[in-house]
Every structure is written in C-alpha cells, then in structure tokens.
Image: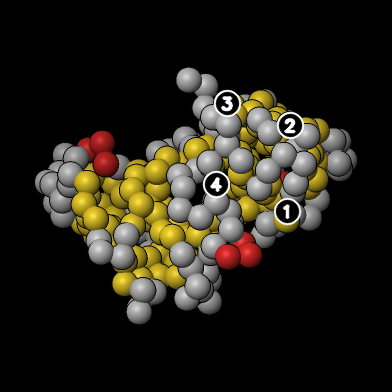
Amino acid sequence: RKEVEQDPGPFNVPEGATVAFNCTYSNSASQSFFWYRQDCRKEPKLLMSVYSSGNEDGRFTAQLNRASQYISLLIRDSKLSDSATYLCVVNLGGGSQGNLIFGKGTKLSVKP
Amino acid sequence: NAGVTQTPKFRVLKTGQSMTLLCAQDMNHEYMYWYRQDPGMGLRLIHYSVGEGTTAKGEVPDGYNVSRLKKQNFLLGLESAAPSQTSVYFCASSYSGGGTEAFFGQGTRLTVV
C-alpha cells in the first residue's frame, strides 16, 4: 500500500459546484497533514494545514480522521481559478522529522 | 523577497555528464529538501537536510549526492547523468520539520539525452 493515496481525477466540474477530494495515509504515526496546490508547470504551494478538529478557510474546508487515516478537502462554490492539482501531504514526524510524503495529486478542472 | 531560488531553471545533459543544481533560501530555514517530480509518480524525496553540515537520504537517493556547507544553500549533484534522471527537480525549505510550511523553488527541468 502506498504511503499517501489520492484519487488522481481529473475532476471536471462547472463553476459554482462543490467538490470533495479524499486522501488516505498508511502510517498511523503520521503527525501533521497538509493540502498543497500546484498549478500547471509551477511549484507546489501550501493551501492549508489540516487539524484534528477540522478547519475552514473561506470556501475551503479540511478534515482529518485519525482513526480511519483519512483526510479530505472540500471546495465550495468552485471558481475557474481553482483549477489546479491538489496534493495531500503527510509528515511522519519522529525519526523521520522533516520528511514530507506527497500524494500523487488530484487534478481539478473547473469549467465555465 | 526571493524565498527559494533554484538555478538553473532548464538544462539538457548528455548521458554520463555531471552537473550541480543550486538551491538558495533567504528565510533562515533549518530544513532543506530536494524532490523530483515525474508524471504519474508525484513528488519523491531525494535527499534532505535538517541543518548546516547535515544531510540524509530520502526515498530515491541513488545517483545523487548533496551538500549543505552553508545554511542558506543546498546543492544537488548528479555525477553521471542517466536518462532515468530526466525529471523536474524541486528544492524546498522549511523553518523546522514537522508541522511547518515548506516553501518551494520554481523547479529545474532537466533532460538527459
């Protein structure tokens, strides 16, 4: 089993739609979790951290379920500018501190 | 603010040639990383460093060497380039490990022919 797994998509949605991405991780000792966004031919950039209590930033909501080793990202009222690849990222912590493990990404395409 | 700067941005190498990719950060970050990104494979960690003078192997270290002689610089070397090393290389840095944000450079597109 891969350490971080994501549905590769692509997700093709109309403007204004709500879309959800899921991510599972295999190492139960993982300590911190993130969603990064990567535009075509650009570098990844942090979208938001994911906290156990869940967190929201405008149209974006992230949730973590440690028992199921599952992370989600919900985007409401999708904009054309949301089109990108969304990367689920897990930090193992402990002896591997600093070692960020990236999922392969989920591609989102928002259409007019 | 420069952030993380990678040089060069593009390079074509012949099989067997050597080269060094330079990463420089001006944020006084302790941690620095080198990743490669290939289609369908996602980002894979090559080597990383938790501070000046330290380096550690990541997921795919074979064929690469690194050095962190100065805190702000992290060099990635290819001693004898192979076509399998054709990839986009990203450098990143973070203030510490764990739950801190990683900042990425713009990437180096390397083709080995």
Amino acid type indicated by mark 2: Lys
Nearer to me, A59 or B86: A59
| Residue named by callout 1 | B56
Residue B113 visible to an observer of this rendering: no
| Residue behind mark 2 | B70
Residue type highlighted by circle 4: Ser
Instruction: Give the chain letter at badge 4.
Output: B
From the viewer's perspective, tell me whether residue B13 is left or right of residue B98. right
User: Is residue A93 among what the camera can see?
Assistant: yes
Q: Chain of mark 2?
A: B
| C-alpha separation, residue under disc 4 versus residue under disc 2 | 16 Å
Residue B111 found in image quarter: top right
Q: Which residue is mark 4?
A: B96
Task: Please tell me whether residue A100 is drawn above or below residue B17 in the rendered image.
Answer: below
Instruction: List x then y, in percent, for residue A89.
Output: 45, 57
The answer to which of marks 1 and 4 sits earlier in the sequence is 1
Give a yes or no on whether discs 1 and 3 share a subunit.
yes
